[in-house]
Image (cartoon, rainbow, N blue to C red):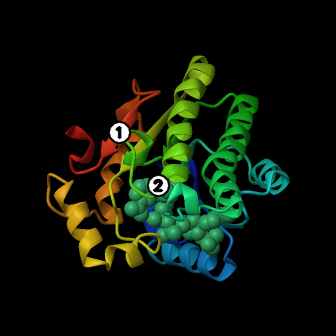
C-alpha cells in the first residue's frame, strides 16, 4: 500500500487503532480521525515513531458539514476504514429516543457522510479505492438487547451492497467486515459479567472472544489489491457465531 492514503474513523482506540497501525505498517499514509485530540495526536506520534506516516483529523463524524469540509481539505483517500461506531445495549421497551438517535446518528448517518465524501473525492480525482465498513455479526443476525444496534448494522450491510453497485464501474470497491465480540472499550464492561461472557463463548466455535488484531488480516486484505475482485461482500470474522 506504499504511497496510498488511508482514512480510519475512530482510529484512536480499539479496532480503529489496530487498523491505523496495520495500514501504516503496510505502507499507507494514514489519516487518524476521532474527537479526542490528545488521543488522535498520540496515535499519529505512535505511527511516526514506527517509521510510518500519519495525519491527525479531530472531527465528530456525526457533523455532516465538518466531514465534508475535512475530507475536501485533506484530499482524496484510496482506503477508508469506516469504523467509528457505538452501542448502548437495552431492551427495546427501555430504549429512550436519545439512544435511538445517537446510535443511528453515528452507526448509519455518519458512516454515510464519510463514505459519501470519500467517494466524491475519488470520483473527482479519477482514482480507484477500497471502502471498508466495519459492520458486525449483528449485521446478519439478531442479538439480545440489541434492537437498535442490529438495525444499524443491517443498514450498513445494505448501504454497502447498494454503494458497491453505484461505484463499481469507477473501480471503487465497498465491503464490510463483520466481527464477533472484540475486547475494546466498547465491550470491556459487558464482557466482565461472567454470565454474559459464558453466553458469548457458547456462541463462538473457536471458544474465545476476539482481539482487535484478529481483524487486521481482513482489513489489510480488503484494503489491498489482493481483494481486487471483491466488492459488495461481507467478510465474517466471527469465530463461527453466524455459522449455526
Ligand atoms: P471503541 O469504543 O473502542 O472506539 C470507538 C472509536 O470511535 C474511538 O476512537 C472514538 O474516539 C471514535 N468515535 C466515537 N464517536 C465518534 C464520533 N462521533 N466522531 C468521531 N469518532 C468517534 O469501539 P470499537 O473499536 O469496539 O468499535 C469500532 C467499530 O467496530 C464500531 O463500528 C463497532 O460497532 C464495531 N464492532 C465492534 C465490536 C466489538 O466487539 N468491539 C464487534 C463488532 C463490531 P472519540 O471518542 O475520541 O471520538
Quarter assignment of residue 131: top right
Q: Which mark is residue 235?
A: 1
Where is residue 240? Give x, y as percent.
21, 46
159 sits left or right of 222 in the view? right
Identify the element where label 2 is drawn: loop
Quarter assignment of residue 115: top right
Ligand 1 under 8 Å from disc 2 Cβ: no
Q: Which residue is disc 2 drawn over?
A: 146
Where is residue 117? Give x, y as percent.
73, 42
Which sits earlier in the primary sequence, circle 1 or circle 2?
Answer: 2
- Residue at 55% in and 51% down: 148
Q: Which mark is residue 157?
A: none
Where is residue 191? Give x, y as percent.
33, 73
Where is residue 103? Give x, y as percent.
62, 57
Q: Residue furthest left?
A: 206
Q: Residue furthest front?
A: 93
**Of the pair 142 and 132, the residue shown nearer to us:** 142
**Of the pair 191 and 95, the residue shown nearer to us:** 95
Amino acid at each position: 500500500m506504499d504511497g496510498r492514503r488511508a482514512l480510519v474513523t475512530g482510529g484512536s482506540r480499539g479496532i480503529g487503532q489496530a487498523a491505523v497501525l496495520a495500514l501504516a505498517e503496510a505502507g499507507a499514509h494514514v489519516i487518524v480521525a476521532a474527537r479526542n485530540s490528545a488521543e488522535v495526536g498520540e496515535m499519529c506520534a505512535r505511527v511516526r515513531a514506527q517509521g510510518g506516516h500519519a495525519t491527525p483529523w479531530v472531527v465528530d463524524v456525526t457533523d455532516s458539514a465538518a466531514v465534508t469540509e475535512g475530507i475536501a481539505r485533506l484530499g482524496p483517500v484510496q482506503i477508508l476504514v469506516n469504523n467509528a461506531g457505538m452501542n448502548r445495549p437495552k431492551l427495546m421497551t427501555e430504549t429512550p429516543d436519545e439512544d435511538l438517535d445517537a446510535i443511528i446518528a453515528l452507526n448509519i448517518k455518519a458512516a454515510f457522510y464519510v463514505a459519501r465524501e470519500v467517494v466524491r473525492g475519488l470520483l473527482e480525482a479519477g482514482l480507484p479505492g477500497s471502502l471498508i465498513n466495519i459492520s458486525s455479526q449483528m449485521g446478519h443476525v439478531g442479538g439480545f438487547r440489541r434492537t437498535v444496534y442490529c438495525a444499524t448494522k443491517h443498514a450498513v450491510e445494505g448501504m454497502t451492497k447498494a454503494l458497491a453497485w453505484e461505484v463499481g464501474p469507477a473501480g471503487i470497491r465497498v465491503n464490510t467486515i463483520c466481527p464477533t465480540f472484540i475486547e475494546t472499550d466498547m465491550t470491556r464492561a459487558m464482557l466482565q459479567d461472567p454470565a454474559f461472557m459464558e453466553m458469548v463463548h457458547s456462541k463462538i466455535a473457536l471458544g474465545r472472544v476476539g482481539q482487535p488484531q484478529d481483524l487486521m488480516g481482513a482489513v489489510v486484505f480488503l484494503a489491498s489489491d489482493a481483494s481486487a475482485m471483491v466488492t459488495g461482500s461481507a467478510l465474517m470474522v466471527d469465530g463461527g457465531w453466524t455459522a449455526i
